[in-house]
Image: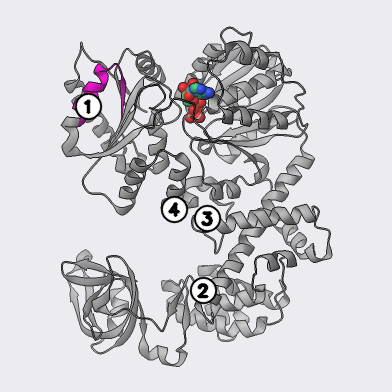
């Protein structure tokens, strides 16, 4: 950054020490550069206003020019609100404030001319806007022009004059001084091929756009810039990882793999499974450490891939482990893998929190002397006491549940870091995969095993309960099994628990012994009881499994054909998709019934609709991203990786793809960034890489 941009913010004309302090504390703006990069979040088009009589529809964002025609305060205490009638030449609307009344009231009088902006809602026949953004027309006179930037502000900022107008003024002081001081830092071939405006022009235009088109170009340029450097960083890390980190070389595919493939494999691999195994196999034989993400929809057969990859490790004289997020899932992997390997000379062990001390000791010993080939377990695998003779491969199932720090422990279990295969529970949208796992190689299983019938999903309200029970009964008579899942959310644990038990009672009453029996599994049970109930259901001794989301991940009972999800509106999309994936695993037509209350928020409605519309996990992941945003999906532990100012991963997926593509192209042209015109990029990257130590090694 140039000297000018590093000037402390206090020195900008009209700011001074005390207001500078507020900019520092409220917005983290320390210097001119900080202010320059504090972008408006939208623009007001001074040339376009809505007429009140033409407000298009509910919740549309409107901008209206008019005058206050009346004002009154209503109610007391918490119910207190301020209501202003506001009219233009076509009609009247109410403006409503529940907060900040003392601040706004003195500013509004009959006859005050305003421009207001906000979401219009209708109560009865009357339109209203709560907490509109307002601007006083008299303040507005001098500054009339086409597009006006709007900056986020806040109470403390406003107290010292930094409402959006004040911020606009400060930026206005700053901008003339940057002329000629902003160097282009993208290589010419990228600027040209994407027809980008220069960085300097973009910084001007984003604050003071001369037209809609220029505002858009400025945003595009700066978003691209941001995402491009992120992708450069990720690609570089991947490069560094591959150059520096040697891995065990698994020369051969080995006997265990071949024997399994030729004699014991329970079904033909799908084309996608074969392709993915080839991709992994190539990594393992390369001598470079593997760090690969395996994506696949629920039920696409990731477990079998994991097993076969572990057999390659064993065939080369190494041990392998697989880590699952819950004891139930680990136990299930243990059973299904032991069964598949029954006729082979492979030693599999299970280590979970509940494993008895005596057993543990044996396992520790056998791991260290190499008798155990495959260790399956929960994060108990990460304990320091767990030492291997020669761990060559670690598989992590359902990765999003493990924190970065936990995973890093696996790296230290051998002299070279064991190869790592990370498997996701549900698909991740491409933009997120590129951003959060941009330094991993990705394999995708994009094909389900043959013969699966798409699950039929429907949404029912409580009033349909009797017919849902009727349906369950019919399915049981056909020999099928049923899941009924209740939410269990920490904040409302007591209530949820109560609902679960009430539901269990209602079901046991409706489906009585001796004809029917019902299992129950929830988090408050001890592990032995859970296992016992799971086994009853898995072996077909009970027909109905009432459970909380402990069964969400991975549980596999092919004969189960109906998934009833209670209070489905409380679940997130990927959770719903996971749960639904528990059925549709056998030959029978399967069903998912989403039960909900009558009152549904907009998001909840969209989630349930999406579930009824599609079974495609990748599509569902995209909707989920739009509804929730990336931080929520990837978890707080990882959101620190992202420091995006302008780009929105859910909306700017195209730019992410473009940034990736161009970053690749650049590294192909100049892998070490040695050309003169790439020196600024190289310097910037060095800075970024230095500031963020090490996360890529472990994600
Ligand atoms: P996920 O990818 O969700 O972990 P699983 O590995 O649990 O899926 O596999 C889902 C089901 O599909 C299991 O019952 C598994 O045995 C079965 N399966 C896996 N691969 C195949 C295949 N190639 N052909 C038929 N069934 C398969
Ligand atoms: Mg699985």
Q: On the image, numbered disc 1 is attached to which residue? A: 471
Q: Residue 414: where, in percent of width, then height? A: 72, 27
In the image, is residue 354 part of the stretch drawn in magenta? no
Q: Residue 360: where, in percent of width, then height? A: 56, 15
Instruction: Find residue 626 and name its label.
Output: 4
Q: On the image, numbered disc 3 is attached to which residue? A: 649
- Classify 10 Å Cα crowding around label 3: few (below 14), some (14-19), many (20 and above): many
What span is colored magenta in the figure? 468-485
Whether residue 676 is situated above or below residue 207 in the rendered picture:
above
Q: Nearer the viewer, residue 630 or 371?
A: 630
Q: Please tell me in which quadrant of the rendered image residue 562 appears.
A: top left
Question: In the rendered view, does 381 fall on the left or right side of 416?
Answer: left
Q: Please tell me in which quadrant of the rendered image residue 85 appears.
A: bottom left
Looking at the rendered image, the quarter that the N terminus falls into is bottom right
- Classify 10 Å Cα crowding around label 1: few (below 14), some (14-19), many (20 and above): few
Q: Residue 55: where, in percent of width, then height? A: 27, 73
Whether residue 691 can be seen here: no
Q: Earlier in the sequence, mark 4 or mark 2?
A: 2
Separation (CA) of disc 1 from disc 4: 34 Å
* Marks 3 & 2, CB-CB < 8 Å contact: no
Mark 4 or mark 2: which is in front? 4
Mark 1 or mark 4: which is in front? 1
Q: On the image, numbered disc 2 is attached to which residue? A: 22
Mark 3 or mark 2: which is in front? 3
Q: Earlier in the sequence, mark 3 or mark 1?
A: 1
Which residue is at 65% across, 12% downward?
259
Separation (CA) of disc 4 from disc 2: 34 Å
User: Cβ(mark 2) to ligand 2 < 8 Å?
Assistant: no
């Amino acid at each position: 950054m140039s000297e000018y941009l590093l000037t402390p913010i206090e020195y900008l004309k009209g700011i001074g020490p005390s207001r500078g302090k507020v900019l520092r504390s409220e917005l983290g703006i320390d210097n001119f550069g900080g202010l320059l990069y504090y972008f408006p979040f939208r623009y007001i088009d001074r040339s376009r206003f809505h007429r009140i009589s033409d407000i298009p529809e509910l919740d549309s964002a409107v901008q209206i020019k008019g005058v206050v025609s009346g004002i009154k305060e209503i109610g007391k205490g918490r119910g207190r609100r301020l209501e202003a009638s506001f009219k233009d030449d076509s009609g009247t609307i109410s403006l409503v404030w529940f907060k900040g009344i003392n601040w706004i009231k003195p500013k509004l009088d009959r006859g005050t001319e305003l421009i207001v902006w906000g979401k219009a809602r209708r109560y009865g026949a009357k339109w209203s806007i709560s907490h509109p953004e307002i601007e006083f027309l008299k303040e507005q006179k001098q500054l009339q022009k086409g597009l006006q930037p709007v900056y986020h502000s806040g109470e403390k900022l406003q107290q010292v004059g930094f409402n959006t107008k004040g911020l606009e003024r400060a930026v206005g002081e700053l901008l003339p001084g940057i002329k000629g001081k902003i160097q282009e830092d993208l290589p010419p071939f990228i600027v040209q091929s994407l027809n980008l405006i220069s960085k300097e022009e973009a910084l001007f235009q984003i604050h003071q756009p001369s037209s809609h088109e220029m505002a858009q170009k400025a945003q595009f340029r700066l978003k691209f810039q941001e995402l491009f450097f992120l992708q450069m960083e990720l690609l570089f890390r991947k490069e560094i990882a591959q150059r520096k980190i040697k891995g065990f070389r698994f020369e051969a595919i080995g006997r265990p793999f071949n024997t399994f493939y030729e004699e014991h494999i329970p079904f033909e691999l799908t084309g996608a499974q074969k392709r993915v195994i080839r991709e992994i196999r190539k990594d393992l034989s390369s001598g470079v450490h593997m760090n690969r993400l395996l994506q696949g929809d629920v039920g696409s057969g990731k477990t079998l891939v994991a097993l076969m990859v572990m057999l390659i490790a064993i065939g080369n004289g190494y041990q392998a482990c697989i880590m699952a997020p819950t004891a139930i899932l680990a136990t299930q992997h243990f059973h299904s893998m032991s069964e598949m390997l029954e006729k082979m000379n492979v030693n599999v062990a299970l280590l979970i929190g509940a494993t008895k001390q005596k057993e543990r000791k044996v396992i520790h010993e056998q791991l260290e002397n190499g008798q155990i080939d495959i260790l399956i377990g929960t994060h108990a695998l990460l304990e320091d006491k767990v030492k291997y003779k020669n761990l060559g491969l670690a598989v992590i199932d359902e990765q999003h549940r493990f924190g970065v720090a936990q995973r890093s422990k696996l790296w230290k279990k051998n002299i070279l870091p064991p190869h790592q295969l990370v498997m996701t529970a549900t698909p991740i949208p491409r933009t997120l995969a590129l951003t959060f796992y941009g330094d991993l190689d990705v394999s995708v299983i994009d094909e389900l095993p043959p013969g699966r019938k798409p699950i039929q999903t429907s949404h029912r309200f409580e009033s349909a309960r009797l017919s849902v029970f009727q349906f369950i009964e019919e399915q049981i008579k056909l020999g099928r099994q049923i899941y009924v899942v209740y939410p269990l959310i920490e904040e409302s644990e007591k209530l949820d628990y109560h609902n679960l038990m009430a539901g269990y009672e209602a079901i046991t009453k409706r489906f009585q012994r001796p004809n029917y029996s019902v299992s129950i599994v929830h988090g408050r049970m001890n592990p032995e009881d859970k296992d016992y109930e799971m086994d009853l259901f898995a072996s077909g001794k009970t027909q109905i499994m009432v459970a909380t989301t402990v069964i969400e991940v991975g549980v596999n009972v092919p004969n189960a054909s109906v998934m009833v999800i209670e209070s489905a509106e409380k679940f997130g999309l990927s959770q719903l998709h996971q749960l639904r994936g528990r059925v549709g695993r056998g030959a029978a037509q399967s069903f998912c019934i989403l039960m909900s209350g009558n009152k549904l928020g907009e998001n909840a409605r969209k989630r349930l609709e999406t579930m009824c519309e599609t079974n495609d996990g990748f599509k569902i992941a995209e909707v989920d991203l739009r509804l929730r945003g990336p931080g929520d999906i990837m978890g707080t532990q990882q959101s620190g990786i992202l420091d995006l100012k302008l780009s929105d991963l859910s909306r700017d997926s195209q730019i992410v793809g473009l940034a990736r593509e161009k970053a690749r192209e650049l590294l192909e042209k100049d892998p070490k960034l040695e050309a003169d015109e790439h020196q600024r990029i190289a310097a910037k990257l060095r800075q970024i890489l230095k500031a963020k130590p090490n996360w890529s090694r472990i994600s």
